[in-house]
Amino acid sequence: MEKHRDITVTSPLLPDPDELGRLMKDIWSSRWITNNGQFHQQLETALCQYLKVPYISLFTNGTLPLLTALQALRISGEVITTPYSFVATTHCIWWNGLRPVFVDIDPANCGLDPDKIEAAITPRTTAILPVHCYGKPCDGARIQQIADKYGLKVIYDAAHAFGVESGGQSILNWGDMSTLSFHATKVFNTAEGGALVIHDEATKRRIDYLKNFGFESETEVVAPGINGKMDEVRAAIGLLNLKQVDRAIAARHQAALRYREALRSVPGIRFFDDMPGVKHNYSYFPIFVNADQYGLSRDQLYSRLLSHGIYGRRYFYPLISTFSTYRALPSAAPDNLPNATRIANEVICLPMHHLLTPADLDRIIDIVANPDKA
């Protein structure tokens, strides 16, 4: 029997080792390894230009920007958010001493359903924290209308939305702030890392204080900050990966087109097409399995893929609202979240990255498209 290599759900961009070695020599010779060094500054500038945003503050991972955004905007009380995300989204609310309030999602994009938000607003609500799930933009216009009506802040978890645009404009400019993740599993990575997108210079300065223990100068601390700085090594990786991210996105696009072409006629399998007017980054390729029509449950298909060395992921299952920390919240009741509950039980993200070969895609498609095949 022919031995196939395993296929993972993602494969990180890796910088050219020779180029990385050259930058590492520059770092060692400068004796400046962290604390806003030259590569840190260069990466902030380069990302602002690439992403079409006014200000960026780099962080050492993608969770700290969310924690810091909630602090910087002085959010209190309750925050409306989604149960359908990576758990860090809600953890950041909890760590700030705030109460998450879960609202159901729109099946059309897996983001917060604007029709459900107003009913969840109470006198204690101060912010909305939506997620651009799989890089699919939320209904930002309606979310902002609701926020303006009730005087709420909007912080977008845009961990999946690197480079995503709508109508030629970056969706990272929506709301009061947007956060990014540069984890190795993301379209663009710095191994570990993240960023906060900010609209004005004064807020950028405050964020930079907060991520460096609150230091304004060598002897002055102006806020109770944390240590969230990105180091020079990660910034150097980011500068090199930025050179190749467009090629990686183009390869992901071709993989998405192949999946859609092959799976569109398979009963019981649903997936997303591109949204009109949106520049996508193809960060994930989720499919949703209707067991009655398909003949196998989602978990049966997931196990079949694993048995063939294909490592999909059930993003996002289980729902955040089902975890022990949150399940007692009234808003966590499954009856309050019917769409999120159903979709969490149907989703598998198929492998989606720039190194997938035609043979890899054929192997994956053959298993998904033929549920009766042994």
Image (cartoon, rainbow, N blue to C red):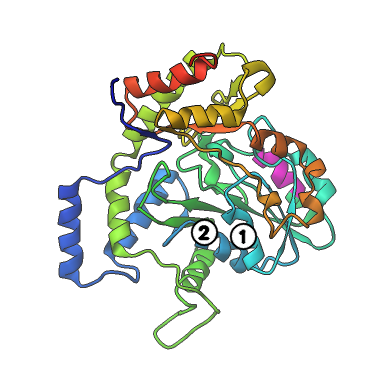
Q: Main secondary structure of the magenta part?
A: helix
Q: Is residue 117 left or right of residue 236?
A: right
Give yes or no for contact between labels 1 and 2 (Cβ–Cβ under 8 Å).
yes
| Residue 5 part of the magenta segment | no
Does dot 1 land on a helix, a strand or a loop?
Answer: helix
Is the residue 300 above or below the residue 122 in the image?
above
The residue at 34%/39% (across/down) is: 245
Region of the chain picked out in magenta, as a range: 139-146
- Residue situated in front as seen by the camera: 36 or 83: 83
The residue at 80%/54% (across/down) is: 150
Q: Few, some or many C-alpha atoms within 10 Å of disc 2 (few <14, some 14-19, many ≥20)?
A: many
The mark closer to the camera, 1 or 2, is: 1
User: Which label's residue is closer to the chain start, 1 or 2?
Assistant: 2
Q: Amino acid at mark 1?
A: His
Q: Position of residue 181 (x, y in %)?
A: 47, 51
Q: Which residue is mark 1?
A: 91
Is the residue 79 above or below the residue 186 in the image?
below
- Residue situated in front as seen by the camera: 48 or 128: 128
Q: Position of residue 261 (x, y in %)?
A: 48, 14
On residue 211, the disc is none
Is the residue 43 above or below the residue 342 in the image?
below
Residue 351 occupies quadrant: top left
Q: Position of residue 206 (x, y in %)?
A: 52, 70
Q: Is residue 186 left or right of residue 71?
A: left
The residue at 38%/56% (across/down) is: 44
Q: Position of residue 64 (x, y in %)?
A: 51, 63
Q: Few, some or many C-alpha atoms within 10 Å of disc 1 (few <14, some 14-19, many ≥20)?
A: some
On residue 63, the disc is 2
